[in-house]
Image: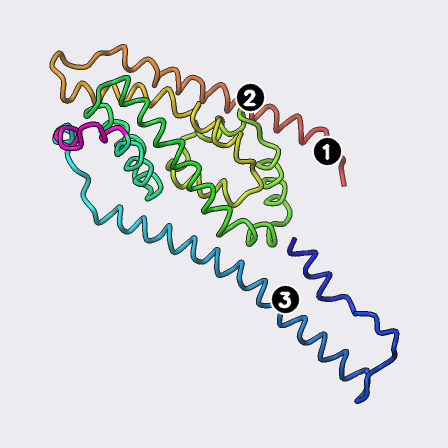
Amino acid sequence: MIPAVRRLLGRRSPNPAGPPSGGASGGSASARGAGRRVWRVVATSSALRFGMLLFLLAGFGVMLLLTPLPDPATLPHLADRLGGFAPVAAVLGGALLLVALVPRTFITLAAGAIFGMLPGALYALGAALLAAAVGFAVGRLLGRDFVAERVRGRLARLDRWFTRQSVFGVMTVRLLPISGFGLVSYGYGTTGARLLPFLTGSVIASAPTAFGYAALGAAVTSPGGINWYAAAPAALGFIASAVLLTRWWRAERRTRATLPLK
């Protein structure tokens, strides 16, 4: 859309009736100057939105450093106070914390401590889905235009890779220990990735650790100690991440091998 606006502003309007009184050159120069001013406003707005995104993330990071996390062992009392609204509060509150860059591990442990293994894992996945949608939307609104206008070379190739990504590709990125859940959601929004594959891949990639950490959280507040079967989903998640990373690396090598030499 932005390149189209630039071409539109740079195009001279036809004037079949002839030049107006006062000289055509003055009118043309004035129109070009106005077009350049409008384009500067359009271009600057994307930079301002991107700056707002960086400021938002920095604010979340500072808040995360300064705000102490509560003790998971004290969290089951919150569910007793909320009663039937506790599951809704868990999903909405967990999503809000994920958007604020709180680690998903803590949220899943807390959900398991409050609700038990299976309900806690499901509520944690619901919070992850909602947070992924919100983070993606904010990143797309504030950062996509800025990135699309400025990526060149290898960054442009990377952006096209994100645009072509399927559910499998999103799962690959989500399973890599490269960044927090919320930060990846914001970053995806700035790329050309599609929303539905992104949300689907995010939930599937989050499922193994959701059940594993929810079981560990439930063991904190339940007698009987830790059930070691709870570690199986997390272990499967690490194995799956290694397999997905290997397949992605091989696919990238095949893609580069088929590119024409310049």
Choose the circle earlier in sequence order: 1 or 3: 3
Task: State yes or no: discs 1 and 3 in contact (Cβ < 8 Å).
Answer: no
Q: Residue at x 37, y 31 (%)?
A: 128
Disc number at residue 39?
3
- Between disc 2 and disc 3, the foreground one is 3
Instruction: Check disc 3 and give the amino acid type.
Output: Trp
Image quarter of residue 133: top left
Q: Nearer the viewer, residue 45 or 258?
A: 45
Residue in front for this viewpoint, 77 or 106: 77
Q: Earlier in the sequence, mark 2 or mark 1?
A: 2
Position of the C terminus by quadrant? top right
Type of residue at label 1? Leu
Label 2, label 1: how far apart the Cα atoms are: 19 Å
Mark 2: amino acid:
Arg
Q: Please give the name of the residue rendered at 35% of the width and 52% of the height, measured from the top-left corner.
A: 58
Tell me where residue 207 appears, x and y as whole percent.
38, 21
**Badge 2 is on which residue?**
247
Name the N-terminal-most of marks 2 and 3: 3
How far, Cα to Cα, is label 2 from label 3?
44 Å
Place of residue 123 in the rendered image (x, y in percent of width and height, measured from the top left):
31, 26
Q: Which residue is mark 1?
A: 259
Q: Is residue 217 left or right of residue 74?
A: right
Range of the magenta residues? 77-87
Mark 3 neighbour density, 10 Å: few (under 14) some (14–19) many (20 or more): some
Which residue is farthest front? 84
Residue drawn at 68 percent across, 71 percent down: 35
Residue 248 covered by magenta stretch: no
Q: Is residue 55 left or right of residue 252?
A: left
